[in-house]
Image (spheres, rainbow, N blue to C red):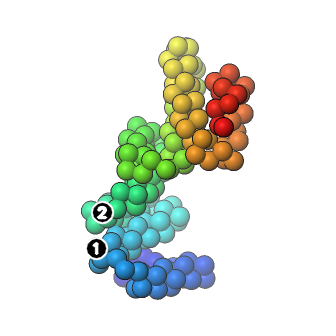
Amino acid sequence: MPRTQKNDNFIDKSFTVMADIILKILPTNKKAKEAFVYYRDGMSAQAEGEYAEALEYYEEALTLEEDPNDRGYILYNMGLIYASNGDHDKALELYHQAIELNPRLPQALNNIAVIYHYKGEKLKETGDHDGGEAMFDQAADYWIRAIRMAPNNYIEAQNWLKTTGRMQIDVFF
């Protein structure tokens, strides 16, 4: 039984019903529809904090999904799980793969920047000032890219860029 058939709350059940209707009427092939079911089940498991289960569903979705944009979203969600579990290197790898497939993912760019910023702070704490600054510069590059795509988002990042002098005045226009 698919995971989404086990949901007990009204919103999840409603979403599942609507998604099933859309799947039935969309002019897509069977493989793409199966990939979406696994992706949807992965999102459900992830929302409940069942990360290992979510990763299994996402892996299965990746084996079926052919659309690069959709594969990008799957990889992005997998990156979220690895980042939340503290495996920043694996998260970075997945976010970069997601951006290669779907360059219009400002949220992945933002998350890459957050990880580089975190790594920069850790390096500075150990006394590696130059290494920390290099990580901050990488974070700034990714935040600038994300903000260019979504100028109304990432206000804290915009403030950090301004206060650290890493943002040109016309960067978003």
Q: Which residue is mark 1?
A: 31
Image side of residue 135 versus residue 33, left or right = right
Could you say which disc has been placed on residue 15 in the image? none
Q: Is residue 121 above or below residue 91?
A: above
Q: Amino acid at mark 2?
A: Glu
- Do tag 1 and tag 2 residues touch (Cβ < 8 Å)? yes
| Residue 70 vertical placement versus 131 (above, below) | below
The residue carrying mark 2 is: 66
* Nearest to the observer: residue 84 or residue 59: 59
Q: Residue at x 40, y 85 (%)?
A: 24
Q: Quadrant of residue 166?
A: top right
Task: Kindly indicate the quadrant of the structure image that contains residue 155.
Answer: top right
Mark 2: few, some, or many residues within 10 Å (few <14, many ≥20)? few
On the rendered structure, is 99 left or right of 124?
left
For the residues labelled 1 and 2, the Cα–Cα distance comes to 9 Å
Residue at 56 percent across and 19 percent down: it is: 133
Q: Amino acid at mark 1?
A: Lys
Q: Position of residue 104 (x, y in %)?
A: 49, 50
Residue 103 percent location from the top left of the image: 45, 47
